[in-house]
Image: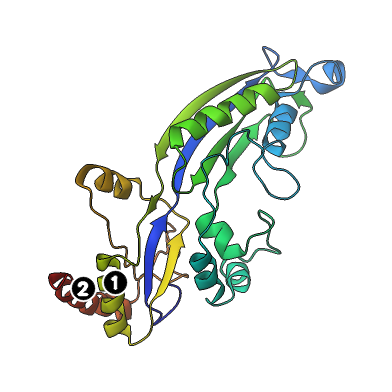
Amino acid sequence: MLGRGIPTLTYGLRGISCLEFTVRGPVLDLHSGVYGGAVANPATAVAQLVASLHDDQGRVRIAGFYDQVEPLADWERKMWASLPDGEAATLAETGAEALWGEAGYTALEQRWGRPTAEVNGIGGGYQGEGSKTVIPRAAMAKLSFRLVPHQDPDLVLELAAEHLRQHCPVGCRIEIEKGHVGPAYVMDPHSNFGKAAQSALRSTFHDEPRLIREGGSIPIIQSIKNVLGIDSLLLGLALPDCQIHAPNENFTVENFQKGIELNRALLAEIAGC
């Protein structure tokens, strides 16, 4: 849900593609004073590869990455612009100092309707207390890509791997391990079942439903659609401060009770479709 008491229909989810890459240089850690300046540093190479993923406008620089991306519909941009201030909400929810993202899109559009490339982990070299002047023999990073409808998760991994290979600095070699993938999901919220969901939300919360996509991924939703040819109605009741996946993840009793009401109303509405 967008907030307490705000009825929300989520009609889309981003997909996901993951990979891990390792950059290898010398066969052992080297003394940075003895060999520094003459031997490529894998940790520096990883930093350069990570930096190569975006331009200074926040766009992903992988060739072909946007080829399957369709523009957001006018009604979507209008709907999302009518919601509470997405920039302020994003700052409040994250505690970030400032926003950063693809130029030309609002924070909600960036989070819900645009694809991304993110670094989920990075490491290499000495990690202990104080200094140890080494050129590490290897360094690594973990990447994930959040995808929008029509982007092929496997193709995105191929494009990303080729980008990394092409940009790997001289003197290093790169190893790429592809991870899990899942497609994006989207339904028509103006379909009969979408209207039924909105009607159930309206009668439960006595307010007009907001139509949104979400930035997270539930790959099986699209698999269900592919196999059975049916859509899923995503009427989640978690609040923005639910701390999803954290040790203190929470769900309000109020919304638990509203969920019972909502499901009763939804079944009644679907019966009339």
Residue 128 can be seen, yes or no:
no
Residue highlighted by disc 1: 195
Q: Residue furthest top?
A: 27
Kindly state the secondary structure of the residue where label 2 is placed: helix
Q: Of the residues shown, which amino acid type is indicated by label 2?
A: Leu
List x then y, in percent, for residue 64: 59, 34
Q: Residue furthest bottom?
A: 206
Kindly state the secondary structure of the residue where label 1 is placed: helix
List x then y, in percent, for residue 254: 31, 81
The residue sitting at 53% across, 46% down in the picture is 69
Residue highlighted by disc 2: 266
Side of 105 relative to 214 (left or right): right
Characterize the local packing of mark 1: few (<14), some (14-19) or many (20 or more) Cα atoms within 10 angstroms.
Answer: some
Q: How is the image coloured?
A: rainbow
What separation in Å lies between label 1 and label 2 (alpha carbons)?
10 Å
Viewer-proximal residue among 134 and 254: 254
Q: Is residue 21 above or below residue 54?
A: above
Q: Please identify the quarter of the rendering in which residue 258 is found.
A: bottom left
Locate the C terminus and report the quarter of the image it occupies. Answer: bottom left
Characterize the local packing of mark 2: few (<14), some (14-19) or many (20 or more) Cα atoms within 10 angstroms.
Answer: many
Q: Are marks 1 and 2 in contact (CB under 8 Å)?
A: no
List x then y, in percent, for residue 133: 79, 27
